[in-house]
Image (tube, grey):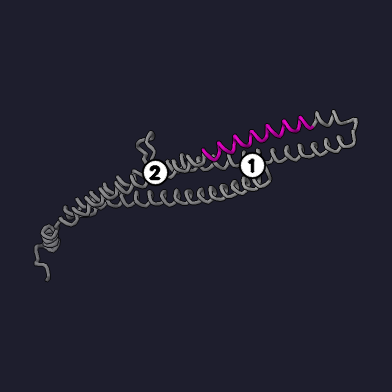
Amino acid sequence: MNSVQHDTIKANLDYDEQTIKELKGHFTAIIDVERKRYNVYNELCKTLEQMQKEREKIFKLKEIYMELGKAFFNVIQKLKKDDDPSDFGFLKLLEKRIIPSLNGHLDQIKQVRQNLQQYILKNTLENEWNEKRAIAKSKNDEKLQKIERTHDEAKRDKHFASSTLSQNYQTYVNDKNQEMKSMFKHFLNGLLDICATGLTEYAKVAQKIHYTSEKKETEEFIAKMLGNQKQKK
């Protein structure tokens, strides 16, 4: 393993670390947005429930508000499934699956960096003892035998460090690639689940709104409120 490989591995680790930190920042921001979306729509559902049960006097509109509340509730349940702890909603997917996965990558990068530094150190020591051995040989130094033993030990240490680095770097790259694919697959499936539910629910309510006519009931309500006086045209 030469210096070019050292630099390439280091550059790749630096690039991966930057990318993973950026992704973590994006997904953390998405969590904040989705949590706010859940809270806002949850409050909207409560208001629609009050409109349907207490405030609205036109029955046809009560039906619409009730269906709207159901639709919004069914969609936000895909974000946060409080009633089913065994089923991951979209927020839990982000918090419990995606963010920990990214943190795991950062830990792996840290470990491989340590392996790389250890290999560089052992490689440097082995080269130094190799030079000392060559000098001792040329001078027929009486310490040659001791230097050779130390060099052999340094060579074994270098080989072990190289093997550890190779194995851990290979594992890291394979794990990272598989995890990235899996992470985005689950993320997209979560989005598709929300979108599909929204499409179904909202289309159903939109159709009900389109075909609902409250005009006659409204006229009767106004007439009642005005003491059966004719509405001004």
Residue depicted at x 68% and y 31%: 160
Residue 76 magenta:
no
> How far apart are the two marked residues, 1 and 2, measured between alpha carbons?
33 Å
As rendered, which of 193 and 180 lies closer to the eye?
Answer: 180
Magenta stretch: dominant secondary structure = helix
Left or right: 86 in relation to 95 = left
Q: Earlier in the sequence, mark 1 or mark 2?
A: 2
Looking at the rendered structure, which numbered label has been put on residue 90? Answer: 2
Residue 221: x and y in percent read: 13, 59
Q: Which residue is mark 1?
A: 113
x and y percentages locating residue 48 in the rendered image: 27, 52
Which image quarter: residue 164?
top right
**What are the residue bounds of the magenta stretch?**
151-174
User: Quick one: SS at disc 2?
Assistant: helix
Residue at image x 83%, y 31%?
147
Question: Is residue 171 part of the magenta span, yes or no?
Answer: yes
- Residue kind at label 2, given as amino acid type: Phe
How many residues crowd around disc 2 within 10 Å: few (fewer than 14), some, or many (20 or more)? many
Task: Return the residue nearer the eye: 177 or 102.
Answer: 177
Identify which residue is drawn at 77% across, 30% down.
152
- Element under disc 1: helix
Q: Residue at point 62% right, 39% down?
A: 112
Residue type, mark 1 in image: Arg
